[in-house]
Amino acid sequence: MTDKLELDIPVLLPEVPDEADACVGRLVSTLSAKPGVDRAHVLPAAGDVPAKLCIHFDPAALPLPRVREMVRAAGAEISGRYGHAAWEVKGIGHERRARTIGETLCAIPGVLQADASSAGTVRVEFDRERITESAIVDALAGLGLKRPKQLATDDHAGHDHGPGGHAAGEERHGPGDGHDHSHADFLGPNTELIFALACGAMLGIGFAIEKLVPGTPEWLPTALYIAAYGFGGFFTLREAIDNLKLKKFEIDTLMLVAAAGAAALGAWAEGALLLFLFSIGHALEHYAMGRAKRAIEALAELAPETATVRRDGQTLEIPAAQLQVGDVAIVRPNERLPADGFVIKGTSAINQAPVTGESIPVDKAPVADVAVARAKPDAVDAASRVFAGTINGGAAIEIEVTRRASESTLAKVVKMVSEAETQKSPTQRFTDRFERIFVPAVLILTVLLLFAWVVVDEPFRDSFYRAMAVLVAASPCALAIATPSAVLSGVARAARGGVLVKGGAALENLGSLKAIAFDKTGTLTEGRPRITDVVPVDGASETDLLAVAVAVEGLSDHPLAQAIVKDGREKLGDSAIPAASDLKSLTGRGVVATVGGETVWIGKVEMFGAEGVPSLGAAATAAVAELRENGRTTMVVRKGDRDLGAIGLLDTPRGEAKAALERLRGMGITRMIMISGDHQKVAEAIAKDVGLDEAWGDLMPEDKVASIKKMAETDKVAMVGDGVNDAPAMANATVGIAMGAAGSDVALETADVALMADDLAHLPFAVGLSRQTRGIIRQNVFVSLGIVALLVPATIFGLGIGPAVAVHEGSTLLVVFNALRLLAYRDPAGKAA
């Protein structure tokens, strides 16, 4: 027989983002191997309850205190041992280089996982007992990458973000701070393009002299061709050396082999042409990918560099990075807001499009209670909450800062978008696996063609030339960039439209959906229910019923409780409200508290008559039945041994919900279901109003998870919710989508896709963009493989190296520019600019 112990994961591993984190897996593995532990596993987060680590152990072998001590010791060891870091670097430029850097870092002892993106983001997980973060920075510098800039450090140990006390977002340098480790960029960001053009110039001059100027010494054009080799092969050689250190033969190595082979045959001009076309293609690819990266960098530039603050009775202008929580910032008309906060003075219409994608400015007014806002800044009403990077309207306002600049919603979005570039999509994982098989196959084919002269009556020179041409033609250059370029552009465009997509997998899955499940409250409805009916029973008065309900629900922060308190107080007027205490929540069913020395139960009718709660009388049961028949959400109130009655509430459907669902249906979403904890009749009434055919009611949180799993058996399914109470269901869906994520840390962390605005109309934009992205990925893969399939037989039957390189590099540029079309994607409804 085993006993069970549950402990909160965030307590064991501080700052751990979720139960899927690698450090959690290590903790589970470590504990599972301990003698006396039968099993260790994770219980997912549910609403406000964090993820828990569940330990099943043999009490005869391990006393409970020893288990608790052992678990905490293991957590502390792992917290202190494993670190995570993300940097933004300069000098990657293209996907093959990114992959080489990732694999080079992975080969360093102590680095457990590393990914890099062509846009310049590097993410590393490492073991502190084997390597330091500064050593990894040194390794990046050694790879020729400029000025690592800290995006985030998630070290689970509660240290400052950024090594050595540096704040997130601060620039840090490798050894020899202030020096540029990337000597290859000494002519500026266009050094690679300049070298490629110089290669072309040397090639052109040498060819002209050789063909047009008789009597010229033979060494002169050859010298110019050699110079062209130097300019054209400079960057390619650097990449090839990195690959050879990893014992890999990539496209860069293959091109150098082909160019060297041409030189060995005396075909200097053709070898120089190969390097020129390859280098110019690389440089243009670098430039095109830079455009997508600049779209992401533009997000970070939305926040102003300075802020006007009032401190000690003085008005000062300071760097925005120096703003502290509690500062009062003055924002003049048409200025950008320097930080997240809430309005304390003035009213204005603020353009929130940079963060939420909303096309219409939102009216903002001062908070009603500053003290409450300071205590619970995340609970501030949307009409008073403001975000860094948004644009003030025509009136001056004053805001109280609730987050430092490096912790603002905008900063988090920029960080997550940058990290999303390193998350590979299903198609990219497929192409990576394909390349691992394809490249060796090309090398084998090349070796076989080298010996074609043995079978075919031709000089070795011709066989060698044909083998080099096939080597060029079959190199999967375009395939390597086909998917990353589309994912990068799609993620950047989504962010500009107020939609945060966490990587290629979420982007592709969102575009392949056939089914979507919607939570009711706050998603399809406003989430602000109103009291519509007050039905007292058994001789109770309406005043008695409301007074007790307001007293108890005043201790709760549930949306229904807040609605009862707000509307109840209005209806009661000056009537006295008794004191309530000892509130306990019965998850998904209701609450219990004490009023005037008697126990009070308030909740769904299903709560009564189960688990020790008294049953309802006939009158209360009949009142509930009538209210539900009319589509009302019902709350029954019982005090001591007497039913007081029922309260009926109605949540108003969102105005944009019906149109958004119709657009989704037009995009091919064949099944849309509302899932709710409310009574089935209530769920059906709301579903009918918004145009849904299916509604599942009476669902507890675990029932919602089961519903999502059931839907996922037949279709890819998305779950749309608020990212907090719906976290378990979202985690079990193919794609979890959180609405109104701006300012909500939980929603940003738990969702695969976050709609920054609290507006369902952004969902069709996100689905449409992802479908466009999937289409472009398919086009790019088809073009990439099609060109290879066309060129390989063509070169075997005589097509030269020059034309092969021209078509090959042309296809690479084609797929990149095709992907960049996503940056110009327009939402047909104009909801996301």
Image: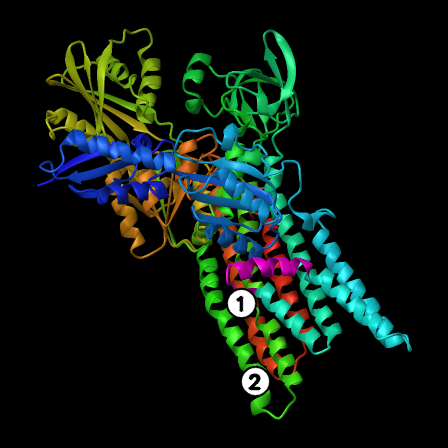
Residue under label 1, please give it: 782
Q: Position of residue 14 (x, y in %)?
A: 36, 31
User: In which quadrant will I find the C terminus?
Assistant: top right
Q: Position of residue 260 (x, y in %)?
A: 66, 71
Way the structure is coloured? rainbow
Q: Residues within 10 Å of mark 1 (few under 14, many from 20)?
A: some
User: In the image shown, does 155 or 363 lie closer to the viewer?
Assistant: 155
User: In the image shown, does 346 or 170 lie closer to the viewer?
Assistant: 170
Secondary structure of residue under mark 2: loop
Q: Is residue 46 visible?
A: no
Q: Is residue 509 left or right of residue 453?
A: left
Secondary structure of residue under mark 1: helix
State if disc 1 and disc 2 touch (CB < 8 Å): no
Asked if the magenta segment contains residue 240, the reply would be: yes
Q: What's the magenta region? A: 234-250
Give the image quarter of residue 478.
Answer: bottom right
Q: Position of residue 608 (x, y in %)?
A: 14, 28
Q: Amino acid at mark 2?
A: Phe
Give the image quarter of residue 745.
Answer: top left
User: In which quadrant will I find the N terminus?
Assistant: top left
Residue under label 2, please give it: 451
Residue shown at 19% from the left, 14% from the top: 594
